[in-house]
């Protein structure tokens, strides 16, 4: 009997690549996101109704999320791996210039949405001794100018992952926080409000991680023996590393 992974934010980037990676290994997948056309095309490309189910909802909306999860039937209701990947950054400016609505959108998506779907699926994951993979970020641990609320949400995701793992330690449920660095995806178009020139500058000459690299990492975590838990994993392109602290001099 094939195993099933539910992957949030599967319409692009890491989520789409992760769905493709799991299906290639014989898994079935539940794909979530807001863009129905993309979800349905991906589900069809991944083998149609036997292998992939498209579930369209906004993860910020608790009622929509609960209805979507409650509506799962058959093998698609028996989730072995939850990949909490849906998320976004909005803006790169300093806190004093930021839009409060954009901050709220990041908190509602990256924190509230993630904990909502996790809680809704927890009983099933415990019953199947499953795995939760949460997409945090290097921004969870490393502050940078313009990271403000985005970094705060990802610090939450990392710490929530570790706390969840503590709570579930007697249940055989594994929990992993994946913390990628510079990765090429629509993430940077969303963050810059669709600014293609800014997108090009972010990745120019950097040989960034690709969604397939993160998909490979997530699949590796899921394929380890059930007694092995990767707690957190920071992944960067070779071109990226640390810089000195900034010092403002009067
Ligand atoms: P993408 O923009 O390519 O993908 C983001 C996904 O999240 C999309 O499928 C989008 O679907 C979904 N999503 C966003 N908001 C909502 C919402 N309200 N409801 C449902 N789904 C939503 O970005 P990445 O693949 O790069 O990012 C995936 C995750 O990895 C994010 O959590 C991001 O913070 C994190 N990350 C990204 C890094 C990077 O540099 N790219 C590095 C480190 C972490 P749709 O728009 O169809 O709803
Ligand atoms: C995305 C990576 O460095 O832009 O989480 O915050 S970074």
Image (cartoon, rainbow, N blue to C red):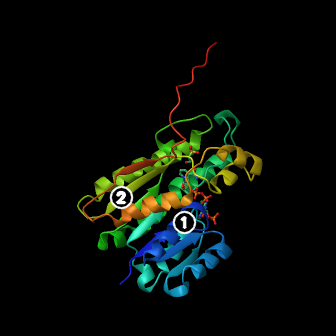
Instruction: Tell me which corner region of the image, top left, top right, bottom left or bottom right, holds residue 76.
Output: bottom left
Mark 1 or mark 2, which has the lower sequence index? Answer: 1
Residue 212 location (% of width, % of height): 53, 61
**Element under disc 2:** strand
Please, is residue 40 above or below residue 248 in the view? below
Is 145 on the left-hand or right-hand side of 120?
A: right
Residue 38: image location, x then y, percent = 65, 73
Q: Secondary structure at mark 1?
A: helix
The residue positioned 32% from the left and 55% from the top of the image is 165
| Disc 1 + disc 2, Cβ < 8 Å | no
Name above or below for residue 52 compared with residue 146: below
Can you see residue 172? yes
Q: CA distance from mark 1 to mark 2?
A: 20 Å
Q: As rendered, which of 5 and 66 lies closer to the eye?
A: 5
Q: Find residue 17 and name its label.
A: 1
Judging depth in this view, the residue of 44 and 209 nearest the camera is 209
In percent of the image, x 51 and y 53: which residue is there?
111
Would you name the residue on which mark 2 appears? 175
| Ligand 1 within 8 Å of the CB at mark 1 | yes
Which of the pair 61/241 is nearer the observer?
Answer: 241
Which quarter of the image is occupied by the C terminus? top right
Please determine whether, in this image, residue 3 is positioned above or below residue 160.
Answer: below
């Amino acid at each position: 009997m094939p195993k099933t992974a539910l992957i949030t934010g599967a319409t692009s980037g890491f989520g789409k690549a992760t769905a493709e990676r799991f299906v290639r290994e014989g898994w079935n997948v539940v794909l979530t996101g807001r863009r129905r056309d993309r979800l349905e095309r991906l589900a069809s490309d991944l083998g149609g109704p036997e292998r992939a189910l498209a579930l369209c909802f906004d993860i910020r909306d608790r009622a929509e999320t609960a209805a979507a999860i409650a509506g799962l039937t058959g093998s698609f209701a028996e989730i072995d791996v939850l990949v909490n990947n849906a998320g976004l950054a909005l803006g790169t400016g300093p806190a004093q210039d930021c839009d409060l609505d954009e901050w709220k959108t990041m908190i509602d998506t990256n924190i509230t949405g993630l904990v909502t779907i996790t809680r809704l699926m927890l009983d099933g994951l415990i019953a199947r001794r499953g795995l939760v993979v949460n997409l945090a970020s290097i921004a969870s641990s490393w502050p940078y100018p313009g990271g403000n609320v985005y970094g705060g949400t990802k610090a939450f995701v990392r710490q929530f992952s570790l706390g969840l793992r503590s709570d579930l330690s007697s249940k055989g449920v594994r929990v992993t926080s994946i913390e990628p660095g510079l990765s090429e995806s629509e993430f940077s178009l969303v963050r810059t409000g669709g600014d293609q020139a800014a997108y090009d500058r972010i990745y120019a000459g950097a040989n960034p991680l690709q969604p397939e690299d993160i998909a490979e990492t997530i699949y590796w975590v899921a394929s380890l023996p059930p007694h092995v838990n990767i707690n957190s994993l920071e992944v960067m392109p070779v071109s990226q590393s640390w810089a000195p602290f900034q010092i403002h001099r009067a």
